[in-house]
Amino acid sequence: MPDLKSETERFRHWADGLAMHDGQWECVYEAWPAWYEAVLDWVGGRAGRAAPDADIGQVLYAIARDRDAQYLVREIRKRHPDALLWLTRAALVQGEAEARWQLAVELGQLPRGDEAEGLLLALARDDDEYVRRRAIRSLAALGVQSAEALAWGEWQRVDENQEWARMSALECLRQLKSPRLAALLADALQDTRPQLRRFAQQLREHDGGAAEDG
């Protein structure tokens, strides 16, 4: 049976031998199946028991490297949903942004509960814009009304990814049926950034003009 530590070290050794780490470089790793099995077996064996920080760090590292397929985090949610909670708590302390945003997505797939909501609210204050974006979208999908103020805040925040953050904010406000949507949609339709403008137009057309009319 594949071992978590040995499979993680195997990947690290392979990654260290690469000349470049551009784009989706992790996708060409040929031993993903064994690493997947090692991670999922380890997570399944915890069953609420305490685990060394180093082992949890290896799981979070694997999730982060699996950012393209997102297979690991989805399987953990399907097989061991409670593990998402303690992995997210650990990720807030020691995990990479590439792991935190995936956990934020999957937390939004769990039944609404105080702990998952609290973790998402913590992720919604993350330093990384994409982590915040995915956490707020999960909160909106769960119908958490505080996502409205968070989405509004992201609209105002100056960031190199503001165009994407604003598109996400529009979608969140739409999901929440927020009265703030009409004003932001009108602003977006006049924005100089083409992707944001097109996205706003698509939302307006999809809703038959209802959002624009308030």
Image (cartoon, rainbow, N blue to C red):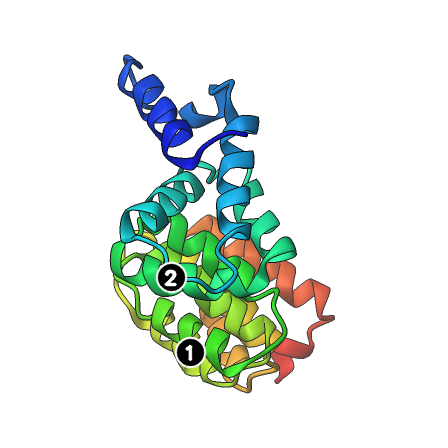
Q: Residue at x 29, y 56 (%)?
A: 128
How many neighbours does mark 2 have within 10 angstroms: few (below 14), some (14-19), or many (20 or more)? few
Quadrant in the picture for residue 179: bottom right
Compared with 165, 30 (above or below) is above
Note whether residue 131 is visible. yes
Q: Which residue is mark 2?
A: 50
* Secondary structure at numbered mark 2: loop
Q: Nearer the viewer, mark 2 or mark 1?
A: 2
Residue type of the residue flagged with mark 1:
Gly
Residue type of the residue flagged with mark 2:
Ala
> Taking 193 as reference, is 138 left or right?
right
Query: Of 130 and 29, which appears nearest the observer?
Result: 29
Note whether residue 191 is visible. no
How many neighbours does mark 1 have within 10 angstroms: few (below 14), some (14-19), or many (20 or more)? few
Image x and y of residue 109, in percent: 61, 64
CA separation in Å, label 2 and label 1:
21 Å
Instruction: Tell me, for residue 198, which label it has, or none.
Output: none
Compared with 213, 170 (above or below) is above
* Secondary structure at numbered mark 1: helix
Image x and y of residue 176, in percent: 59, 80
Quadrant showing the C terminus: bottom right
Query: Of 105 and 17, which appears nearest the observer?
Result: 17
Q: Which residue is mark 1?
A: 118
Q: Residue at x 47, y 20 (%)?
A: 29
Compared with 182, 108 (above or below) is above
Which is nearer the N-term, disc 2 or disc 1?
2
> Taking 21 as reference, is 64 left or right?
right
Compared with 67, 106 (above or below) is below
Q: Residue at x 26, y 54 (%)?
A: 94
